[in-house]
Image: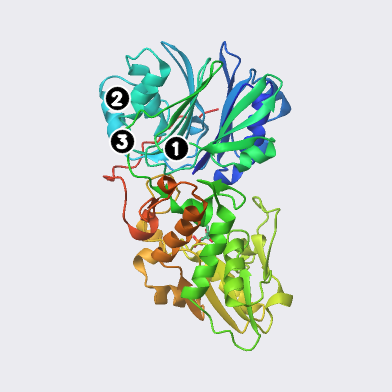
């Protein structure tokens, strides 16, 4: 998964982009990059790792100009190498172009083969590069027409930002699978336009969210102002529901809907669908922090049981180079989470998390809670079993590694050593988001139907036909 940020018309464009990426860091920690422009040429810096460690004040000072785009990456296509870091930048016959992409193209291999057959030479293993080649070979005069022509040949999920010397173009795919929103911030030059994956990036720089970018919309931002076009055939909206489950920050809104409110609604519905006997005042609801917190609040509210911080999260977990010689069980999870005996001992514990992927974390958590003196451990998950890989930009393992694709709920319960295990139903998931979207939608036309969401990771119902292909080729050269 990735996060993108762009700004046009601000004297401190690179610094603002740095801050915007900082607020989007949860969307990818593998690499970060910024490309800016002063209207004459493009300036770029990319680095492996997090934004904070990848950009020094001296690096930022080289990124001149009043416009910039930035990217944080969590690789889904192409390996984890600096050469695959974004924004990708190229010089071609018509000038310079940089691109930042969140999503995943499903016809990437076919496109690449076609482009290579006609002579294109790829520099990276990333799917995004196909878009750059398609733009470069387009015969259209205007950049926006070349971008539109390129994207008309692309299938999959994309929230994209393009930067040239003169324009910033933002595009959201016709199904609006990944989020993208528009904002504005006062600047010495008047009003600067900002675009970001999530509005949390606006909060940090004092920008105001104007609106979500619509499905299939292309925004062209230049010194002449902002203009909106819809160059693609319309499709029905398929917003990724996993953004609401796990990916987006809880203080974000997606399509005007608070992620925090949605997660609490998941928790309330989960408590109704998968109740735990209240007992005699000895039941506590604890979240797996941070991902399970809002759902656990909703669960506790509905179950009328106290919400307690039964697991305490260390905020200083990075890589550790000191590992005990003698094996300490659960060492990895303990670095991040430690049970809080005062909240757990002698209690019947409901532990709420957003999802189970491989099941390894949940298994260790159940053991930790039991060892800390819990009498019973009931696991509740605020989404359905994750059974299918995502081809639209979320990094999920192959089917064989997803515990729910090969095991029944009761087999998973037994593997976790939990007293009970309950997942939210698919209907409960969709209806919880939809109820809030319908409440917030001001016009009947803006109200989503139950099939306005992509939930392929839970249902296997993929909105875009996809033929799995050979894994992406890895370039052997080591980039600097
Ligand atoms: P596990 O079952 O041990 O593989 O880990 C499950 C945990 O990983 C869940 O609690 C989620 O909060 C988190 N998670 C779910 N999906 C992802 C993802 N695509 N990338 C990173 N973490 C995830």
Q: Quadrant of residue 4?
A: top right
Q: Earlier in the sequence, mark 2 or mark 1?
A: 2
Q: Residue at x 54, y 77 (%)?
A: 378
Residue 194 appears anywhere in the view: yes
What residue is shown at x 51% (from left), y 54% (from top)?
244
Residue occupying the point 47% across, 57% down:
433
C-alpha gap between disc 2 and disc 1: 30 Å
Question: Which labelled disc corresponds to residue 214?
Answer: 1
Q: How is the image coloured?
A: rainbow
- Residue topped by disc 2: 115
Secondary element type, mark 2: helix
Extreme residue in the bottom direction: 280
Residue assigned mark 3 = 109
- The front one of 166 and 430 is 430
Left or right, 271 with respect to 409, comes to right
Task: Say which residue appears at 64% left-offset and 24% top-offset.
Answer: 191
The image shows residue 420 at horizontal and vertical percentages of 49, 79
**x%, y% of residue 287?**
61, 67
Neighbor class of circle 2 (other Cα within 10 Å; few <14, some 14-19, many 20+) is some
Displayed quadrant of residue 141 = top left
């Amino acid at each position: 998964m990735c996060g993108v940020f762009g700004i046009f018309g601000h004297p401190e464009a690179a610094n603002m982009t740095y801050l915007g990426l900082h607020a989007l860091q949860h969307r990818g920690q593998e690499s970060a990059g910024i490309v800016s422009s002063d209207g004459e040429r493009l300036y770029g810096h990319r680095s492996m790792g997090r934004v904070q460690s990848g950009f020094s004040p001296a690096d930022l000072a080289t990124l001149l100009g009043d416009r910039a785009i930035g990217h944080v990456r969590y690789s889904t296509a192409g390996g984890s190498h600096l050469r695959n870091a974004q924004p990708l930048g190229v010089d071609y016959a018509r000038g310079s172009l940089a691109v930042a992409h969140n999503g995943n193209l499903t016809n990437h291999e076919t496109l690449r083969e076609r482009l290579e057959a006609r002579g294109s030479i790829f520099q990276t293993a990333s799917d995004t590069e196909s878009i750059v080649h398609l733009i470069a070979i387009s015969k259209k005069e205007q950049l926006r027409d070349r971008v539109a022509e390129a994207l008309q040949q692309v299938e999959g999920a994309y929230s994209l930002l393009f930067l040239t010397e003169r324009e910033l173009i933002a595009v959201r795919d016709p199904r609006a699978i990944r989020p993208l929103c528009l904002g504005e911030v006062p600047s010495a030059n008047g009003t600067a336009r900002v675009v970001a994956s999530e509005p949390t990036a606006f909060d940090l720089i004092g920008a105001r969210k104007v609106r979500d970018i619509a499905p299939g919309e292309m925004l062209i931002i230049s010194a002449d102002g902002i203009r909106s076009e819809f160059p693609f055939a319309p499709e029905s909206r398929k917003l990724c529901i996993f953004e609401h489950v796990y990916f987006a920050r809880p203080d974000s809104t997606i399509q005007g809907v608070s992620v925090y409110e949605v997660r609490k609604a998941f928790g309330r519905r989960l408590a109704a669908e998968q109740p735990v006997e209240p007992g005699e005042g000895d039941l506590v609801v604890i979240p797996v922090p941070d991902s399970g917190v809002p759902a656990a609040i909703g669960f506790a509210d509905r179950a009328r049981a106290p919400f307690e911080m039964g697991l305490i999260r260390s905020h200083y977990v990075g890589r550790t180079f000191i590992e005990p010689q003698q094996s300490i069980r659960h060492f990895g999870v303990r670095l991040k989470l430690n049970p809080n005996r005062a909240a757990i001992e002698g209690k019947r514990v409901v532990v709420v998390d957003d999802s189970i992927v491989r099941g390894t974390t949940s298994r260790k958590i159940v053991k930790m809670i039991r060892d800390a003196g819990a009498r019973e451990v009931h696991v509740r998950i605020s989404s359905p079993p994750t059974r299918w890989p995502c081809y639209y930009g979320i990094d999920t393992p192959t089917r064989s590694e997803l515990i729910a694709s090969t095991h029944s709920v009761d087999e998973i319960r037994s593997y976790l050593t939990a007293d009970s295990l309950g997942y939210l139903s698919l209907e409960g998931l969709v209806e919880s988001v939809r109820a809030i979207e319908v409440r917030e939608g001001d016009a009947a036309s803006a109200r989503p139907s139950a099939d306005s969401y992509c939930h392929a990771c839970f249902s296997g119902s993929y909105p875009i036909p996809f033929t799995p292909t050979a894994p992406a080729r890895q370039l052997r050269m080591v980039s600097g």
